[in-house]
Every structure is written in structure tokens, then in C-alpha cells.
Image (cartoon, rainbow, N blue to C red):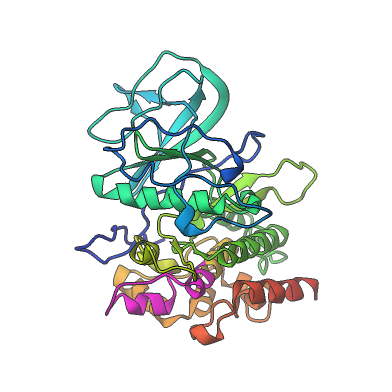
Amino acid sequence: MSKALETPVTERSRNLTPPCTPPPYHPKDPAIPEGCDRQETPSSTDSRDNPRADTKTAVTPTAEETLSWDMISPQSCTKRYQLSGSPSSGYEEFGQGAWSTVYRAIETSETSPSMPLTPPSSPVTTSTKPATNRVLAIKAPARKDAHDVLYHEARVLTYLHSSRRASAYVVAFHGYDATSKSLVMDANPLNLETHAKACLKNARANFSTRTMFDPVCGPQEWQSLATHLIDGLEFLHSNNCIHGDIKPSNILLCPKDNGSSSVAYTPLYCDFSSSRIYDNSTTSNLKETQQITALTSDYASPELLTSLQSTAAIATTAADIYALAVSLVVAAIGTSPYAGAGMEMLKLSMAREGRVLEFARQADQGTRIMKGRMVERCLKDALAKDVGKRCTAKEWRCSVQAVLSG
């Protein structure tokens, strides 16, 4: 499969690609934070190092409402952790990206220091024993100009988790470590991209005419993924959050506790570094909320790719709908619909045409999204090239329910 371009957006470059490998997540730990409902200890970081750290006071929302975006400052992380590995052998990483590196860490006792992660400092090593077996994912900036990107993502996660519903759809967030300018989250290495590839490998090895029209991950699992992710997207959009970089690698698959379920995973959205929060009641922070820092061409909508040729790209709810629909195509066929493109420029040209299902049917697993069958009927409205004809998240949820119950 051809690899998407990976270049961060800076003032000098407008080529947009994924900012990092998403932080993994584990859903089974009972101590998952509940966003702003949690009492946090203020960071001890000198305000000269992080002048924005003490500018706002956290406020607990009522009922299921989220806080106003202008009221949000990043939730402070009070957890202590130790990186896996050592300075001599290197620290274990979950992944790297243009903006950040995601490290594996273990939660330690309350008295151990937090770990500075970014260059030029090396992570601090301590002799403390882990207080729990909890594995954490530490998303640290890989370069100085990534500090604002991760700070913005920390604000977005704090904002979303001010709603109790967020834990059902969004990666658990333990807070922002102002000392290392890092995000602290639970860890689970499985994402939809990795899972889809494994399912494709298994489908090719065990080909059967009986299942050749089903998604590679199986019809029940695909339906569960689709309905939960669409519900999650409706949650984001109803809270004025545009994700901005939805793709299979930014969807974590968390093992379900219920062993009797035929569906093994619950999907969660992660990597909100390209997200945009729009607040109709204010115009402050307009530049910050509209800035897009990353984009992956395979999952970008035609109008978003076209806008890059003439002006700065602005993420929209319609672009999110399109990106999730393409991601669900990947869940059905196991690979990018543009995998057959030999060159990056050809793939980009194909993506601009907005004919995802047509290109996907030309792949060796194209029977799984044949016209008139379940997957195609669930996705066709979300993949409309014309933005005016593309469904909203709420409309999409209703249409998918109608298809699956019919």
C-alpha cells in the first residue's frame, strides 16, 4: 500500500500529513479519568516556561454539557511515570511522527518525579518501583515548534472530557505535563489500521466464496465499528469539535470487558492535534481554532484537497464525515482504496476525484463493497463529492440504522 505524505504544516510549508502515530489506549482500568470532574493539583512548572499554564481556572460543567472553549486551559497531569527502557539502550516508543514521539511508560508512586521527554533533555531515570501495572502513552513534542500543537491538543481533550459522554468515544486523557510539554494517556497499541491489515491477511489466506462479499473484519464487527464511530462523530460535532484528521491509525480499538460479546473491540478517537473547536458565541482565538496542522491525503475530502491549491485548508464537519467513511472502506477491504496507485501524485489525483467506492471496487477485495450491498448502502451518502449532498453525522446515523435494520 502506498504511504501517505508525512510533512507537518508550518508557516513555510502547507503540505499536510499525519502529525504522529496515535497514542494507544487500554479501556479496562477502573481509574480512567472523568475529564474536568477530577480534582487536579496545579502544575509546579515555572510560568516563564509555560506562560499560559496559570491563565485559567478549571470549572466543572453541569449535567452533560461541555465547558465553553474560552474557559478551557489544559487539565494538569498529576500522575507520575517512568519511561520503559534506559538512556543507554534507548526508551521504548509506540511510534513517531512529524510533530511528536509517543513513549511507553509505567505509572509509578506519587513521590517519583515526572519524566522530561523532549530534546535536549533526556528522560530522567529513577529507582522507584511501579505503583501499578498501568501502561501509559506519553505524547511528547519532537521539535520546538510542536509545543503549541500539543498544547492545543491538550486543550481540546480537556474540553471534550468536560462531558461525561466523552469516555465512550474519545481516548482517556490523564492531563498535560507542563514540565515536558507532553500529553499523558492510557496505552493500547492496537488501532484500526493495524487490525484491518491483519484481517485482510487472514481473508486472503482463508478465501471463501461464502464470505467474499463480507467486510474483511466480518459483518458484525464492521457494523459495530460503523455505528459506534458515527455516534462518536455526532458527539464531537454536537460539541462544536471538528477532528480534522480522521483515519484508521487515529482510531484505537479497545478490547471489550464482556467476553460473551461477538464483537471484540470498542473504537475510540485519538490524535486531536488537527482539531478545530468553533464557538458561535465568540470570535476570540479564531486563528488557533481554525488552524489545521495535519492532513492525510488518502482520507481527505475532495474539497479540502482542492482548497490546498489556492488557500489554507480549513477543517469542516463535512470533511470529517468523508474521512470516517473512507476509514470504514478500509475496515471493509483491509487497505486504502488508492492502494493500486503507483505514484503519490496519482493517488492524490484519484483522491481529488471523490470516487472512493469506484476505486475500491477495482482492488482484489472489491467484492466486499459491491453496489447495493450493506457496506456501500451505509457509506454512499457520506462519500458524496458534492458537500451539499453529503449527510451530517445525525443523518448518517439514522440512515445506517435503517440499512442495518432493513
379 shown above or below 226 = below
In the figure, residue 85 lies in which quadrant?
top left
Residue positioned 51% across, 43% down in the render: 24
Position of 136 with respect to 144 (left or right) is right
Please, which residue is most extreme toward the left here?
Answer: 12
Position of 156 with respect to 214 (left or right) is left
Q: In x, y percent, where is residue 200? A: 56, 57
Based on the picture, tell me whether residue 322 belongs to the magenta stretch.
yes
Between residue 325 and residue 42, name the one nearer to us: 42
193 shown above or below 111 = below
196 shown above or below 345 = above
Between residue 148 and residue 120, name the one nearer to us: 148
Q: In x, y percent, where is residue 141? A: 32, 43
In the figure, residue 304 lies in which quadrant?
bottom left
Based on the picture, tell me whether residue 335 belongs to the magenta stretch.
no
17 shown above or below 119 = below
Residue positioned 48% across, 58% down in the render: 69
Quarter of the rendering occupied by the C terminus: bottom right
Residue positioned 38% across, 64% down in the render: 284
Between residue 206 and residue 299, name the one nearer to us: 299
**Does residue 1 appear in this view?**
yes
Quarter of the rendering occupied by the N terminus: bottom left
Q: In x, y percent, where is residue 63? A: 69, 54
Q: In x, y percent, where is residue 364? A: 53, 68
**Does residue 270 appear in this view?**
no
Magenta part of the chain: 300-323
Please, which residue is most extreme toward the top here?
Answer: 127
